[in-house]
Image (cartoon, coloured by chain):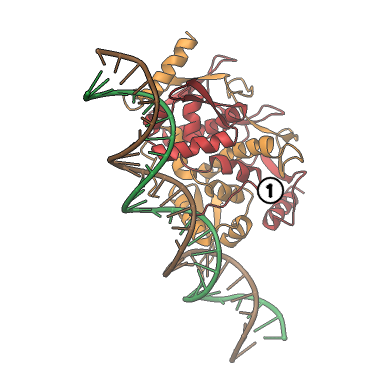
Chain colours: A red, B orange, C green, D brown
Amino acid sequence: MQRSTFSEQPCSVARTLDIVGDRWTPLVIRDLALGISRFDAVQRDLGISRKVLTQRLEALTEHEVVVRIPYQDNPPRYDYRLTEKGNDLAMVVLALQQFGDKWSFGENGPPIRWQHLGCGAISTPTVCCDACGVPIRPGDAIPLPGPSFDPERAPEIAAALDRIADAFG
Amino acid sequence: MQRSTFSEQPCSVARTLDIVGDRWTPLVIRDLALGISRFDAVQRDLGISRKVLTQRLEALTEHEVVVRIPYQDNPPRYDYRLTEKGNDLAMVVLALQQFGDKWSFGENGPPIRWQHLGCGAISTPTVCCDACGVPIRPGDAIPLPGPSFDPERAPEIAAALDRIADAFG
DNA sequence: AGCGCAAGTTTCTTTTGGGAACTCACTCGC
DNA sequence: GCGAGTGAGTTCCCAAAAGAAACTTGCGCT
């Protein structure tokens, strides 16, 4: 299906989707974040086809989200581990998980919870404003054109931003 | 490519990916979150194929992430708007955007910024602990089995959680 | 010598995605 | 009154992925 490449696009969301924009990659990242670092362990856990897992790990390695660390030669065998960039992606996966916890497991509670080591509490990782620390609810923040925004390349977005700016006079 | 369905899986990330697990859906949600609500406007903005956009909007409507609001009959025409559930997904998209801002636009700054109405600051939406409000960095939180965790169905994960629990004895 | 494991690779079939053209049902300008 | 324009899809064809399952390679064990 000759997928379109997003890496050239002037949009942070699109460029990120160039890395995690399919149904398996985020799950692979989740497993790696949990410390499941071997090819076969990830494959068994996810039930992903071996071919697709190979492709995903290659792509993640190219994007420097994952590094392959040899743990034996002959035959060469590797651990897959998240880089710093990969750990940042794991935070995105955490956001996906929160959504699922809220909307898909309302009844019996989520399958996995997180304990925040900083305060010891069982935590609900939430998207917050880094300036004031308050959770951001939809509508609590408004989009503004940033330094590299180009109205020529994104006229629909420019119009949308104008409408929003007008509404907040 | 006969996609596997994730909605039955006992994993919050997988179930969420059943909704947003492709390269277009999160971008559609971003556009809707910015107030771009018409079929053609979204299509023009993203350059997505009309067929795929139709499919995505249908799927999002089925998942109750989006509602179709008629704004004229004859011919019937609709605005697409995010539901409350959709707004929560928009927070996930915000996390995707933050990652892209950090790792794909280091040089010239991001194309879109957000102003938090609560405090007025230009905000970097960050994943934080809801209990103490501190940003969560990778490694700052540890996963624990939740109420609906089933070691039988996820032995690799159970083993990984055990390893982590041991490490924090 | 035979079995099993880890990590891929190959082959074959089934779906999807992209692109572009086509269809309705109006509405607007002249 | 008529052709152009618009909004929202729909239809077709083709190329690129995904799935499943079998095959490969190098050991280590017994």
The residue located at (63%, 46%) in the rendering is A7
Q: Quadrant of residue A74?
A: top left
Q: Position of residue C27 (x, y in %)?
A: 61, 75
Relative placement, left or right, of B156 versus D4 is left
Residue type beneath disc 1? Pro
Q: Nearer the viewer, residue C10 or A15?
A: C10
Above or below: residue D12 compared with residue A4: below
The residue located at (70%, 57%) in the rendering is A155
Q: Nearer the viewer, residue A140 or B169?
A: B169
Q: Position of residue A125 (x, y in %)?
A: 56, 27
- What subunit carries mark 1? A
The residue located at (43%, 40%) in the rendering is A52
Q: Position of residue B74 (x, y in %)?
A: 51, 71
Numbered disc 1: secondary structure = loop
Residue A10 in view: yes
Residue A102 in view: no
Crowding at dot 1, Cα within 10 Å, few <14 / some 14-19 / many 20+, comes out as some
Above or below: residue A156 compared with residue A128: below
Residue labelled with disc 1: A10
Q: Position of residue A23 (x, y in %)?
A: 46, 41
The residue located at (54%, 17%) in the rendering is A121
Numbered marks: total? 1
Relative placement, left or right, of A146 versus A68 is right
